[in-house]
Image (cartoon, coloured by chain):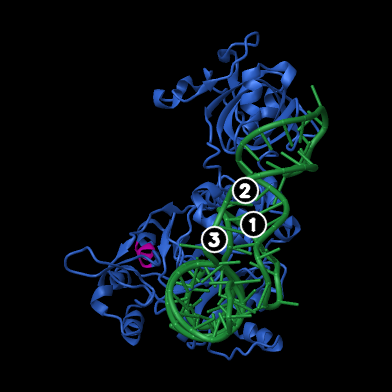
Amino acid sequence: METGLGAAPLPRLAVPPAPRTEGVSRLPSAHRLRARDLHQPGVPLMSDYRRITIAQAGAHTGEPVEIAGWLYNLRKSGKIIFPLIRDGSGIMQCVGLKNNLSEDCFEGLKNLTQESSVIIRGKCRAEERAPGGFEMDIESAEIVQRVSEETPYPITPKEHGIEFLFDHRHLHLRSRRQHAILKVRHEIIKAIRDYFDSNGFTLVDCPIFTPAACEGTTTLFEVDYFEDEKVYLTQSGQLYNEATAMAFGKTYCFGPTFRAEKSKTRRHLTEFWMVEPEMAYATLDDVKRTAEELICFIVGRVLENRRAELAVLERDVAKLEAIKGPFPRISYDEAVEILKRKGSEIVWGGDFGGTDETLLSEEFDRPVMVDRYPTQVKAFYFQPDENRPEVALGVDVLASEGYGEVIGGGQRIHDFNLLLQRIKDHDLPPEAFNWYLDLRRFGSVPHAGFGMGVERTVSWLCGLEHIRETIAFPRMLYRTRP
RNA sequence: UCCUCAGUAGCUCAAUGGUAGAGCAUUCGGCUGUUAACCGAAGGGUUGUAGGUUCGAGUCCUACCUGAGGAGCCA
């Protein structure tokens, strides 16, 4: 039986020996003051117990060990108690028998409150009945801080509403499902970094404060601080990426992004993380190949390292295993035909709505790439198709299972005069783009790149209903705290 | 900004216009293999706010507040 935390995979890498510890003696004295030592005479001294994480328990069966964590749940039956301890690496079911423990220890644990911090000492063994497969026989325990029953832990093991949970998001993160999601998020971010780092890209991060809009000012947050000019929070690092790509060849930036759209759907965050690669001497085809490789690499890593978390999330892993290259590649024209056949009211020249994206992704069992959008729905910097100037060399990658656009990008205009004309056509102030135009004055080359939304990717791979669960502290319209 | 839905115990939810209830949580008691343990008992309420209709409003009407889902927009 999978429990996620409890069934965390055994460490793949050699685990460095845990430092010897003397219980809470490593805590600052202010914390130690409240600790209550429940050590029982006759059992080994504290210093004989090696501190381990719950994930490491399988490698230390039969040894005197201690785990330091929080009380996740407690079941009791007269003279036997089953405290479930979580420590961030997993959940361990412990067993305490009244006859084997001191009165203080047994009563202290028996009356312990949810999420009290506690150190448990004893020995682990394999146990079929325990969630996670291992169980710890308690020899002694030390309560670091007991949660008062006058203010019990608000998130009980029962159901809660969304508003309540996100009002208590700082505590909500301790629960099994949220823990699993953020573990997958970490795996995805690490995979993204590893992919680019091992494929010749250099990380060059871009500014958060930007003086001008990439794609118009309506969706930007204005910052009133700098003396002489209005400054905005970035909505994309792409223009800067084009500069760094001309310096390093292949670069990427990875940071927070801000969109001030008054948008209120399950796909939107006001503040989200985006990774944006940019490549010199590259075309639309290079973008499609890189995007496909990147997605496959990420999915592979998640399947390799986060099976237990996917099980907690009850994710249909077969859907993820189906995500293999080559992804279907269709043109915008073909997409419009498919949508019309499926009853959409889309007309050529318009952008896809959320339901259109869902309809399209239903056609395929893996992500689909849609390229050559009408120039009018794309940003000013997109390179037009040589043979069909009315379409732009841009591509969107729509995730499978209706999760919508996770990647958008394409080839940028490299011709000076064409770019200047497009800036004017879009009523943008050319002087603000002088440095950007410089990139076309001094050794301009065809270049291309894309942006991938981290949270949408996490939401997709975890199979979530709502994107707000994919980030520790979501920022949305009407939600800025905690 | 617009459309739809919802606000009742700490939490999740019931309650034909007629005495506000249950489960969980908390407290007390019982139980030596529990799996969101179980069994018994207790405490816990200005029904989102302000007005109105009515003999009587949690329930009907109006406005507002808060939240959720969606549209537009977007990764």
User: Disc 3 or 1, which lies upstream in sequence?
Assistant: 3
Q: Is residue A400 magenta?
A: no
Q: Can you identify the residue that label 2 sits on? A: A180
Find out whether the residues at labels 3 and 2 contact each other: C-beta distance under 8 Å. Answer: no
Q: Amino acid at mark 3?
A: Glu
Q: Are marks 2 and 1 in contact (CB under 8 Å)?
A: yes
**Chain A's colour?**
blue
Residue A261 placed where, x, y %? 43, 74
The disc label shown at residue A12, or none: none
- The quarter of the image holding the N terminus of chain A is top right
Left or right: residue B63 versus residue A46 is left
First-in-chain label (2 vs 1): 2
In this picture, residue B4 sits left or right of residue A383: right
x then y, percent, for residue A385: 50, 82
Q: Which residue is mark 3?
A: A163
Question: Circle 1 sits on which residue?
Answer: A462
Residue A292 sits in quarter = bottom right
Residue A161: image quadrant is bottom right
Q: Assign the C terminus of chain A to one quadrant of the image.
A: bottom left
Q: Residue at x 40, y 26 (%)?
A: A30
Q: Is residue A242 magenta?
A: yes
- Name the element at disc 3: helix
User: Percent from the top left, x then y, of residue A244?
Assistant: 36, 59
Numbered disc 3: what chain?
A: A
Discs 3/2, front: 3
Q: Main secondary structure of the magenta part?
A: helix
Residue at 62% of width from left, 48% of height from top? Answer: A180
Tell me which amino acid carries mark 2: Ala
| A169 horizontally vs A243: left or right | right
